Amino acid sequence: MTPAVISTDDGAISWIRLNRPERLNAMNGDLVNQLSAALAAAEARTATRVVILHGEGRAFCSGDDLKDLDAQTTSEAATQAWVESIQQITLQIMQSRKIVIAAVHGWCVGGALEWVVNCDFRLFADTTRWFFPEVGYGLFVTGGVTALLTKQVGPQIAKELMILGERHDAAKAVEVGIAWKLVAEAELLEAARTLALAIAARPEEAVADIKHAINEGFHSSLAAAMALETRATVSGFLSAEAQARAKRF
């Protein structure tokens, strides 16, 4: 069976590639579980200083795989476990001692976009298209973005992005501060590599401590936001109206 996530170690860099291109790397149980395992392996690898997260094929990740919606909502316990597995990725990225770079191209949607917001540096290719679809389905966001994104872009922009759910291009991501830098798609992975090597050349403990100190400022609001998000997302997934809307997408 083809793995849903492929990891490659290259000196100080651990590359983690989402690998369901036939589904635009949409999130299912295999992808989420294998991504969690890949992040844990990179965290445990002494030589790794930087993780680069990217997607195979035409997209970074198109969000939750709606073809798996029935499996995700067989019971409240199953839905709770699914949402918590998504939230676990957020904790692994934000609590990691490694710097995590998101190298984003093509579609970046919903839960995947929320993981990108969790990353330390966010490079967007000029082909990137992104949006938060959840509210349109009657669902809720994850990844702590109700706290993180609000602090990064301000409450008015955060409400615009999450409530209206409009589709945006890469330039908009830079404009509002979701993307750190915009590059041509052909140059995306090399730009990520160059950035990773520059970070790896800095003193290891100082870099890790700076990340920890900055992210610690989000800690109390992040924990509260994620708890609220988990409750609201589970409720949304189990809603008949939300399931019907998602299946029509």
Image (cartoon, grey):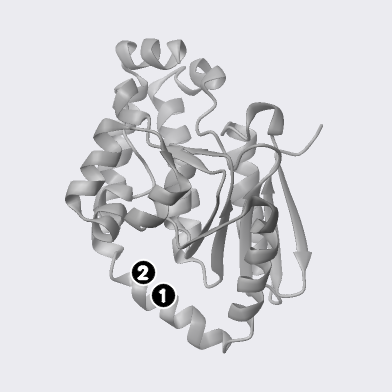
The foreground one among 125 and 248 is 125
Q: Which residue shows up at 55% across the image and 21% down it?
A: 68
| Left or right, residue 82 beside residue 187 | left
| Mark 2 vs 1: CB contact within 8 A | yes
Q: Which residue shows up at 76% across the image and 39% down it?
A: 3
Quadrant location, the N terminus: top right
What element does badge 1 sit on?
helix
Q: Which residue shows up at 42% across the image and 27% down it?
A: 79
> What amino acid is labelled 1 in the image?
His
**Label 2 crowd bin: few (<14), some (14–19), many (20+), radius 10 Å:** some
Check residue 110 in the rendering and tell me which mark sits there, or answer none: none
| Left or right, residue 34 beside residue 7 | left
Question: x, y percentage for residue 42?
Answer: 66, 64
> What amino acid is labelled 2 in the image?
Asn
The foreground one among 100 and 195 is 195
Check residue 212 in the rendering and tell me which mark sits there, or answer none: 1
Quadrant hosting residue 127:
top right
Q: What residue would you read off at disc 2?
A: 215
**Label 1 crowd bin: few (<14), some (14–19), many (20+), radius 10 Å:** some
- In this rendering, the answer to whether 241 lies above or below 193 is above
Whether residue 223 is visible here, answered yes or no, is no
Question: x, y percentage for residue 235?
Answer: 29, 25
What element does badge 2 sit on?
helix
Q: Give the distance between the C-alpha atoms of the residues marked 2 and 1, in whole angstroms.
A: 5 Å
